[in-house]
Image (spheres, helix red, strand yellow):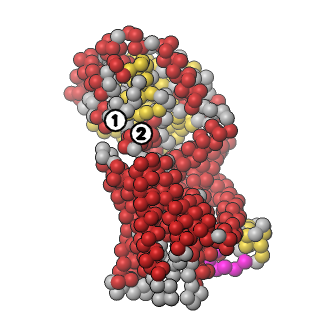
Amino acid sequence: MSKDKLDLLAPANGLLMPITDVPDPVFSQKTMGEGFGIDPDDGQIVSPVSGRVVMLADTKHAIGIRTDDGAEVLIHLGIDTVELNGAPFEIDTSMDTAVKAGEGIGSMNLDQIRAAGKKTTIIVVITNTNDVVNGITVNQGEVRSGDVAATVDLKASQAEANKGKVNKNKYAETAAEVLAEVGGPDNINSVIHCITRLRFYLKDESIPDDDTVRQTPGVLDVARAGGQYQVVIGQTVGDVYDEVIAQLGPGFGNAEGTAKIMAETTAAAQDKSLWGRTKRGASNLIGVITGSMMPVIGLLAASGILKGIMTILTTWGGVSTTSQTYVIINAMGDATFYFLPILVGFTAAQKLGANPVIVAIIGAFLIYPSLVSIYTSGKFTGTMLGMGINSNFFGIPVHIPQYTYSIFPMIFAAWMASKVEPWIKKWMPVVLRMIFSPLVEIFLVGITVLVVVGPIITLVSTGISDALQWVLSSNLILAGLIIGGLYQVLVIFGLHWAVIPIISAELSVPGGHSLLNAIVSVTMIAQGAGALAVWAKTRKNKDLKGLAMSAAISAAAGITEPAMYGVNLKYGRVFITSSIGAAIGGLVNGFLHVDMYGFTGSLIGFPSFASASNPNNFMNFWIVAAVTIVAAFTLTYLFGYKEGDSLKAKTAPKKRHLGE
């Protein structure tokens, strides 16, 4: 090792990955610094560097070492393993102990961690990257404990300046600014700290402005969770905490009072009732869906706007739907939606900790042209449980549905892959993993989605289709209310495809029209109006304001996914108030008997409501649209969204991933 370089050794045997591939957003986005991750084959842990132990987590899942070069190295054992209270870990070192690179410092019980539903990934990061790191080279692939895992190019002058240096004035300044921003002593009940965060129990959590606190020198991020206002400091949190207590007084570090508050908030968070478990399950599912969709929201919004422009050009601009110009531009607009299973597979795998490339390939398999042609050919050899049998697998009759544009099957695929991958690693020899692990995973997950999950979704969709037909034939006003309020829920789970064949059949006959499609159009308008209300009410979060406006425009062009996944579902109540607005609009639609004579809906599809045989229909469409916009916008503005929601949600993906 040269004077301006630092070797980081592998802390265990296993598969080494760059920090960006670690299944934890806070680490993979380098919020904590440069480094790497490793999926361990065994639980013996060695020190990646020589230095002095400056931090040991009470829960034994994290160790901090400061090298002679001034680099502060954090070894984080597993993901979210703080919740295991130290049970799977044995630490063979202590605070202020000198350790050598390659020396054993502890162990972790991998089976116990997996049995608890946690990931065993070991993460090594340099938490003061900005001070000491010029660059890093990571040696990816299978490594042995003690091998050189990464080489760090040091900032020589900074490294020299940082040797053994602790700037207490810097910590005092950070503490003073944070205390002022959270409201000072009058707003603080107590404060504790963990391995990276100050955790304040505040009297009034609305006082701190998260964006302002984030800009404080020495602060990495802010999170709100478990009744705590959490200020992420990093590995020097102990120093800042000491300054906080020095400025507040020892009474604010009351361990007994804090423990009582923590016990109460933990008990509330872990409501064991059926309703509590249902709420947590629904919240987790929505979190996974929105988290998986967020990276592609911009693409969906752009595609939706492009498709809206094409509708205008083909309706009034003289562009023929058979022209090459139309074919080329339409392909641009359709590509994101057609290949959505691949994109969502990749992002969902990142969210759930599976291999993103493998899950993306499973998405590609599901929309492979020959499989798509099985569905689109419409050739059925019989029925089973109400589903048309259109293929067979090893002689077993199966139903292969349409997977293009689908989301939920890929969420399931990513979840299943995250469970299958650790299982494969348990029994497959290391030398065979590179080729045969993906083979086994693609086969098991792909076939499960194709022949089990898909048919189940089809079965549910068929039931929904029959129920919709019954409601429509029974009472049109009631149908508008129910379908208007619930249709976008079907979109979340991909069950809205049950409605498409009904609408297509109604419109395909000469002079065809569709009351159902008119109600569906109302729901698109409502979701856009909800996003527009978020845009109107947002002041501080400029990213959300821009996203909400583009999502509203996209919804007006008939594409609601950006509004739903990027804004409305993310902020919970917005989706509910938008859906209530859609129910009101649907009721009025049923009362006025608004019909639809084309397929394109929402505001961009207004020509679909013009009819010579039904002259009042066009005017009634605009009445329904206005009622829907006013209802969804007003409900969302007054009850569905407040500015603080965006600041909390801005940190939500990070708040549970530091493993504290």
Query: How far across and how far down the image is residue 591, in percent?
Result: 55, 71
Q: Which residue is mark 2?
A: 648
Residue at the image point whose x is 37% and y is 37% from the top = 31
User: Residue flagged by tag 1: what amino acid is it?
Assistant: Asp
Picture layout, residue 523 above or below residue 642: below
Query: How far across and how far down the image is residue 437, in percent?
Result: 61, 50
Whether the residues at callouts 1 and 2 have beta carbons within 8 Å, the answer is yes
How dense is the environment of label 2, judged by Cα within 10 Å: few (below 14), some, or many (20 and up)? Answer: some
How dense is the environment of label 1, judged by Cα within 10 Å: few (below 14), some, or many (20 and up)? Answer: many
Splitting the image into 4 quarters, where does residue 20 fall?
A: top left
* Residue 393 seen in this snapshot: yes
Q: Is residue 426 left or right of residue 336?
A: right
Picture layout, residue 247 above or below residue 303: above
Q: Secondary structure at mark 1?
A: helix
Q: Secondary structure at mark 2?
A: helix
* Residue 144 seen in this snapshot: no
**Pointer 1 or 2: first along the chain:** 1
Q: How many marks?
A: 2
Q: State which region is magenta.
A: 375-380
Splitting the image into 4 quarters, where does residue 607 fall?
A: bottom left
The answer to whether residue 379 is magenta is yes
User: Residue flagged by tag 2: what amino acid is it?
Assistant: Lys
Query: How far across and how far down the image is residue 481, in percent?
Result: 58, 63
Splitting the image into 4 quarters, where does residue 450 fall?
A: bottom right
Q: Residue furthest top?
A: 250
Q: Which residue is mark 1?
A: 210
Name the one closer to the observer, 180 or 335: 180
